[in-house]
Amino acid sequence: MVENARLSDAEEMLQQWLSSHPEDQEARFLLARVFAWQGKHAEALEQYERLLEKEPGNGDYLTGRAMLPVRARPVSPNGLPDLLSHPLGIP
């Protein structure tokens, strides 16, 4: 319970920071991790995608994105994860 409250506090603080410092990649990476730790996989994926737009070869970002459950990834019209839009799921 305490851990969940701390993660929620961290999420709130990071979102406030990023609202005025949107280019802070380190804070965005931490927010992505906080989302993932909370089980907010779609939100984490969104942050990893934003990070990878700026640094597509960053190993930490790629690993974090790859560690998310497949169900958090975009789905193709046939209902399967859209892993073919990018080779190996990498943009």
Image: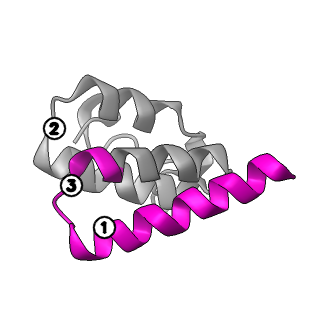
Q: Looking at the image, which is closer to me, 51 or 77?
A: 51
What residue did someone put label 2 on? 56
What residue did someone put label 3 on? 24
- Mark 1 or 3, nearer chain start: 1
Q: x, y percentage for residue 54?
A: 12, 48
Q: Circles 2 and 3: CB distance less than 8 Å?
A: no
Place residue 20 in its image quadrant: bottom left
Q: For the residue marked with disc 2, what is the amino acid? A: Pro
Assign a secondary structure to mark 1: helix
Assign a secondary structure to mark 2: loop
Between label 2 and label 3, give the one nearer the viewer. Answer: 3
- State how far apart marks 1 and 3 are (Cα): 7 Å
- Mark 1 or 2, nearer chain start: 1
Circle number at residue 32? none
Q: For the residue marked with disc 3, what is the amino acid? A: Asp
Assign a secondary structure to mark 3: loop
Secondary structure mostly seen in the magenta stretch: helix
- State how far apart marks 1 and 2 are (Cα): 20 Å
Taking the spot 27% from the left edge, 35% from the top edge, the residue there is 90
Taking the spot 42% from the left edge, 69% from the top edge, the residue there is 15
Taking the spot 55% from the left edge, 49% from the top edge, the residue there is 34
> Would you call the spot at circle 1 few (<14 residues within 10 Å), some (14-19), or many (20 or more)?
some
Q: Looking at the image, which is closer to me, 41 or 90?
A: 41
What residue did someone put label 1 on? 18
Q: For the residue marked with disc 1, what is the amino acid? A: Leu
Read off the magenta span.
1-28
